[in-house]
Amino acid sequence: MPGAQIEELPSRFEAARTWNANRKLGQSTAYRAMDAAIALADRYGIGTVAVDNAFHYLWGGGYVMDAAKRGYLAYTNCTAALAEVVPFGGKFPTLGTNPHSWGFPTTEAIGFPVVIDWATSVIAMGRVQQLKREGLPLPPLAAVDKNGEPTVDPHQVSSLLPFGGHKGYGLSLIDEIVGAFVGGSLPTLRSRWDRDPSEKHACTFFFQAIHPDAVSGRAFAKGRSQAANVAAVIADILGHGNEKCMLPGQPEAAWAKRCAEAGGLLFTEAEVVAFNEIAQEAGSPRWALPAHRSVVI
């Protein structure tokens, strides 16, 4: 909402903050919330910020990645903007894609932060949109059509399915139940502003930042430092014939390097076309493909 201001609510807990975002833009609110959680972690070792009444913050991984680059363990979850996921054993979408995002300050240990960010559906709706742009199929058993039948055609997707059956369903419930404690809206009414004006319709966020010193047992084997111990644990996981395994956050780090080498952000031609469709709807200038430099990856 234009001009919306965050309201910090009274709290008797020194390391916890609760905000009413008053429907402020989600990304701006999220960055401020993570900054506040980090400030609390600097003072108390750990800090949490719960945010009620906000618009969706989009990619949770970006907030924890930023915190991890600054040296903190970080976590966030949020309730999704729309109920698009059918619960395990059900038939009607009553859950969001409800992501979880963790970031770990592993740059000293391995050269980049480990960032574990996942939607609790098999794929996120944004991925469906990407596959639609690229003309590619969905993975099997990721979504259903309007008749509730599994589909791999992104043009036919009506609802999504939780990953791992009951496991993804349980992880999705975490977001909804945490959100309910914060003050969250009913999932099937979220962002449905034309339905039941007496109910809330916005999202909730939860942020946590932890200072590494706050969890250090200070008894690492062979006199290793904390960072060296993290590096040793990861090396053991990726050893023993597992050297080709990839770490979460590694693709993002590789793409960030490629963008830096190219001198700017990299987009596929299909993404530029999609941007131009949005620009046309918004009455903004379109991007001219010949004006952009092509890079072969």
Image: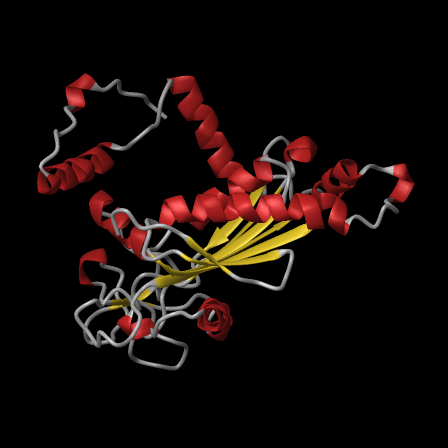
Compared to 160, does 249 lie above or below?
A: above
Location of the C terminus (image quadrant): top left
Looking at the image, residue 15 sits to the left or right of residue 268; the answer is: right
Looking at the image, residue 221 sits to the left or right of residue 51; the answer is: right
Q: Residue at x 38, y 19 (%)?
A: 262
Q: Position of residue 82 (x, y in %)?
A: 29, 64
* Colour convention: secondary structure
Q: In this orientation, does residue 58 appear?
A: no
Q: Residue at x 35, y 27 (%)?
A: 265
Q: Position of residue 229 (x, y in %)?
A: 78, 41
Looking at the image, residue 233 sits to the left or right of residue 263; the answer is: right
173 or 268: nearer the viewer:
173
87 or 46: nearer the viewer:
46
Compared to 207, does 92 lie above or below?
A: below
Count the labels in the image: 0
Q: Residue at x 41, y 77 (%)?
A: 88
Quadrant of the rendered image containing residue 223: top right
Quadrant of the rendered image containing residue 272: top left
185 or 269: nearer the viewer:
185
Quadrant of the rendered image containing residue 269: top left
Q: Position of residue 123 (x, y in %)?
A: 37, 57
Compared to 235, does 10 lie above or below?
A: below
Q: Residue at x 30, y 80 (%)?
A: 91
